[in-house]
């Protein structure tokens, strides 16, 4: 991981140990966006990280496989 992350050790839902990693996805039309609710055409939203030049975004975080919960640092 590229930067120091606050040590999160357990899932806030079930208490299981969280695995650290990086969420990566391809984005050629724009960077990752946060929406308060789902929209039909995915319009609006707030940029979470800047749009990359190469089309790949990496966000460090933690994952609980049991609860399917992601905790991301952006």
Image (cartoon, helix red, strand yellow):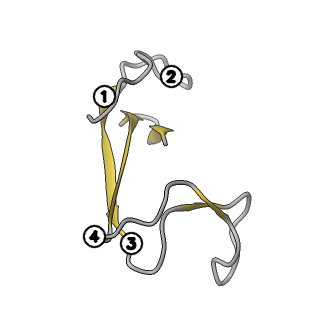
Q: Within the image, what quadrant is residue 65 found in?
A: top left
Marks 4 and 1 sit apart, C-alpha to C-alpha, by: 27 Å
Nearer the observer, disc 2 or disc 1?
A: 1
Q: Which numbered disc flags the more N-terminal residue, 3 or 1?
A: 1
According to the image, label 3 marks what residue? 27
Q: Dots 4 and 2: beta carbons under 8 Å?
A: no
- Earlier in the chain: of badge 3 and badge 2, it is 2
**Residue 3 percent across, percent down from the top left:** 33, 30
Q: Name the one closer to the observer, 45 or 68.
A: 45
Could you say where residue 25 lies in the image, as x and y percent from the top left?
33, 62
Mark 3 vs mark 2, CA separation in Å = 32 Å
> Which residue is found at the position 33% from the left and 70% from the top?
53
Number of the label disc, if any, that sits on residue 19: 1
| Rendered view: 50 above or below 74 | below
- Front label number (4 vs 2): 4
Identify the element where label 2 is drawn. loop
Q: Earlier in the sequence, mark 4 or mark 2?
A: 2
Nearer the observer: mark 3 or 4; the answer is 4
User: Which of 69 and 26 lies nearest the eye of the viewer?
Assistant: 26
Q: Is residue 19 above or below residue 42?
A: above
User: Quarter-wise, where is residue 60 in the image?
Assistant: top left
Q: Report, in whole angstroms, how far the alpha carbon at label 4 lies from the one at label 2.
A: 37 Å
* Residue located beneath label 4 in the image: 54
């Amino acid at each position: 991981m590229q930067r120091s992350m606050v040590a999160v050790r357990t899932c806030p839902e079930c208490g299981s140990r969280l695995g650290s990693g990086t969420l990566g996805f391809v984005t050629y039309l724009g960077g990752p966006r946060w929406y308060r609710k789902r929209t039909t055409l995915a319009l609006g939203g707030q940029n979470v990280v800047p749009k990359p030049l190469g089309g790949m975004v990496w966000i460090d975080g933690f994952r609980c496989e049991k609860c399917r919960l992601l905790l991301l640092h952006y």
